[in-house]
Image (cartoon, rainbow, N blue to C red):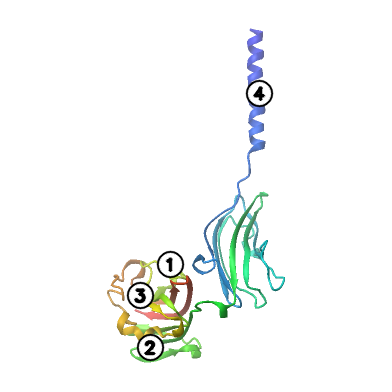
């Protein structure tokens, strides 16, 4: 009987030590990231002197201690000068899960070439997430295409109320049954491309920056325009000039359907309030995207 008791005591002691050992060896949870976009439409390209887009949905293991982004010289590459870029965003410190959505300008002194891109999240529990990718930095003058949105025109019942950069943000109010006409021009285009001109309620908190992310349940399409096989010699093209081929650029406030035949119901049903007029263009030949957003008001 005494031997049995000693054996049971041995088993209990061993189990206790094993449990403690398992607790000691259990690793702290590391941060994770999803929906990562490095460059517009995740093209992993950056243009000198231009806006650069980055997005990631981050979940910390415990809480975020630091968020860093680095663009560093790549081993084996040669550059015309020494250069690197390091950024920190303290506004995310202390959060558990967050959307890191940033736009910043690639400095004018950045050299062309391939670089290592790092996104680093440090956790309060001592772990870290490090994502490493390769990006290419290019002078816009050396791009095969450099699409630019400009010469935007907005009119109400054929009365021009906004033209190019002369707009000083008056309150642009459209009422039920008004005809909203929105012209958008994209210049310096070649090859194949597509443009969407859309209205989006601000209350949806939905901000697409490229056509790949368009949710047609949330946008009212004013126009859709495509071009194909434009030769390099024609580097300037005004998309509204081919409007007769590709469809209208006007919509009646209160219309049952938008320019591509989608019903204006549910999330995108007409309501009084603030909207954004958003222009999105993608050059599908060279995987280049640009967008522009301007506020208007609808009184329905």
Q: Which mark is residue 155?
A: 2
Q: Earlier in the sequence, mark 2 or mark 3?
A: 2
Q: Quadrant of the N terminus?
A: top right
When asked about the image quadrant of residue 219, the answer is bottom left
Please name the residue that numbered disc 4 is placed on: 14
Evaluate if marks 3 and 1 touch, with contact meaning CB atoms under 8 Å apart.
no
Residue at point 63%, 11% (across, down): 4
Q: Nearer the viewer, mark 2 or mark 3?
A: 3
- Mark 1 or 2: in front is 1
Q: Circle 4 sits in a helix, a strand or a loop, which is it? A: helix
Disc 2 crowd rating (10 Å Cα; few below 14, some 14-19, many 20+) is some
Which mark's residue is nearer the viewer, 3 or 1? Answer: 1
Point 67% across, 36% down: residue:
24
3 or 69: nearer the eye? Answer: 69
Graded by Cα atoms within 10 Å as few (under 14), some (14 to 19) or many (20 or more), the crowding at tag 1 reads few
From mark 1 to mark 2, how far is it between C-alphas?
A: 28 Å
Image-quadrant location for residue 215: bottom left
The x, y position of residue 147, in whole percent, is 48, 79
CA gap, disc 3 to disc 1? 15 Å
What is the spatial separation of the Cα atoms under label 2 and label 3, in whole angstroms?
16 Å
Q: Which residue is mark 3?
A: 221
């Amino acid at each position: 009987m005494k031997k049995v008791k000693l054996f049971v005591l041995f088993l209990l002691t061993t189990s206790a030590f094993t449990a403690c050992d398992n607790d000691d060896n259990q690793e702290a949870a590391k941060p994770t990231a999803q929906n990562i976009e490095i460059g517009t439409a995740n093209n992993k390209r950056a243009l000198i002197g231009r806006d650069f887009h980055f997005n990631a949905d981050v979940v910390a293991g415990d809480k975020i201690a630091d968020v860093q982004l680095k663009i560093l010289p790549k081993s084996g590459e040669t550059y015309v000068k020494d250069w690197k870029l390091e950024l920190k965003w303290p506004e995310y410190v202390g959060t558990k899960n967050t959307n890191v959505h940033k736009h910043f300008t690639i400095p004018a002194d950045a050299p062309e070439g391939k670089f290592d891109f790092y996104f680093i999240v440090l956790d309060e529990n001592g772990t870290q997430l490090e994502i490493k990718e390769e990006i290419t930095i290019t002078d816009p003058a050396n791009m095969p295409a450099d699409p630019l949105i400009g010469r935007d025109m907005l009119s109400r019942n054929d009365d021009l109320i906004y033209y190019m950069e002369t707009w000083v943000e008056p309150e642009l109010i459209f009422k039920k049954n008004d005809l909203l006409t929105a012209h958008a021009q994209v210049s310096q285009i070649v090859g194949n491309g597509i443009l969407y001109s859309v209205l989006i309620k601000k209350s949806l908190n939905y901000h697409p920056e490229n056509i790949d992310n368009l949710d047609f349940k949330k946008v009212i399409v004013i126009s859709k325009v495509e071009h194909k096989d434009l030769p390099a010699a024609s580097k300037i093209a005004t998309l509204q000039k081919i409007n007769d081929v590709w469809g209208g650029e006007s919509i009646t406030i209160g219309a049952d359907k938008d320019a591509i035949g989608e019903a204006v119901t549910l999330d995108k049903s007409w309501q009084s309030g603030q909207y954004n007029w958003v222009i999105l263009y993608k050059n599908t030949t060279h995987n280049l995207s640009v967008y522009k957003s301007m506020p208007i008001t609808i009184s329905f």
